[in-house]
Image: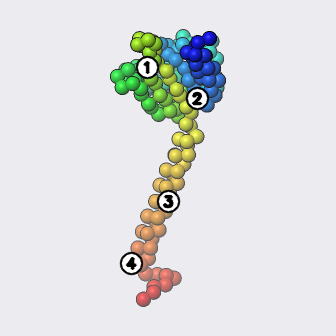
């Protein structure tokens, strides 16, 4: 075996077996041509169910109506890659917060399609949302406390001790 074919085979095995990332190839029109173990776990489709389908089925109705999948391929061609975070959908219809990178793939200088790498960031998104909610609650409590103290100082109460 040549060094190049060994490297290609090693790379194929590595990508195929990665489980934390959905890694797959789509053709120049956006139809899925490969599917790794991570894609099967994350998106719930077996290779025979998804290969040949258009990748836009992972996007929500609004994203599809406004042409986001097609636009991402155009940006990837123009800029060398596109990175996005947003809601994507699984086979069972549930959504997850995804980090997506799409890049054009060339063989001997000819554009043959795109690589697509997707990572599930739902837990991180939920943690960020909780953190923002906690911050907003703390800000509200602080404002309420300061408004209350200002009122007490301004109008005085017998149970508030003033130090002079």
Query: Going from the N terminus, do you reach mark 2 or mark 4 first?
Result: 2
- x, y percent for residue 147: 42, 68
Mark closer to the observer (4, 1): 1
Quadrant position of the N terminus in the picture? top right
For the point 61% across and 20% down, the residue is 10
Res. 65 image quadrant: top left
Q: Residue tagged by mark 4?
A: 154
Q: Residue tagged by mark 2?
A: 21
Give the secondary structure at mark 3: helix
For the point 53% across and 41% down, the residue is 125
Res. 143 image quadrant: bottom left
- Answer whether labels 4 and 1 touch (C-beta < 8 Å): no
Q: Residue tagged by mark 1?
A: 104
- x, y percent for residue 130: 54, 48
For the point 41% across and 73% down, the residue is 150
Q: Is residue 16 visible?
A: no
Give the secondary structure at mark 1: strand
Looking at the image, which is closer to me, 81 or 45? 81
Query: Going from the N terminus, do you reach mark 2 or mark 1 first?
Result: 2
Query: Going from the N terminus, do you reach mark 4 or mark 1 first?
Result: 1
Looking at the image, which is closer to me, 14 or 121? 14
Give the secondary structure at mark 2: loop
Distance from label 3 to label 4 (Cα)?
A: 24 Å
Distance from label 1 to label 3 (Cα)?
A: 46 Å
């Amino acid at each position: 075996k040549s060094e190049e074919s060994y490297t290609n085979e090693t790379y194929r095995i590595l990508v195929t077996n990665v489980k934390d990332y959905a890694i797959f190839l789509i053709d120049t029109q956006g139809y899925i041509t490969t599917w790794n173990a991570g894609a099967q776990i994350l998106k719930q489709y077996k290779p025979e169910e998804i290969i040949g389908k258009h990748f836009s089925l992972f996007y929500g109705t609004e994203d599809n109506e406004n042409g986001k999948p097609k636009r991402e391929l155009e940006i990837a061609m123009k800029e060398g890659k596109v990175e996005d975070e947003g809601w994507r959908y699984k086979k069972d219809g549930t959504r997850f917060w995804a980090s997506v990178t799409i890049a054009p793939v060339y063989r001997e200088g000819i554009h043959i399609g795109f690589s697509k790498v997707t990572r599930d960031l739902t837990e991180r998104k939920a943690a960020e949302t909780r953190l923002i909610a906690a911050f907003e609650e703390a800000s509200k409590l602080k404002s309420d406390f300061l408004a209350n103290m200002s009122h007490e100082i301004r109008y005085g109460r017998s149970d508030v001790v003033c130090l002079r």
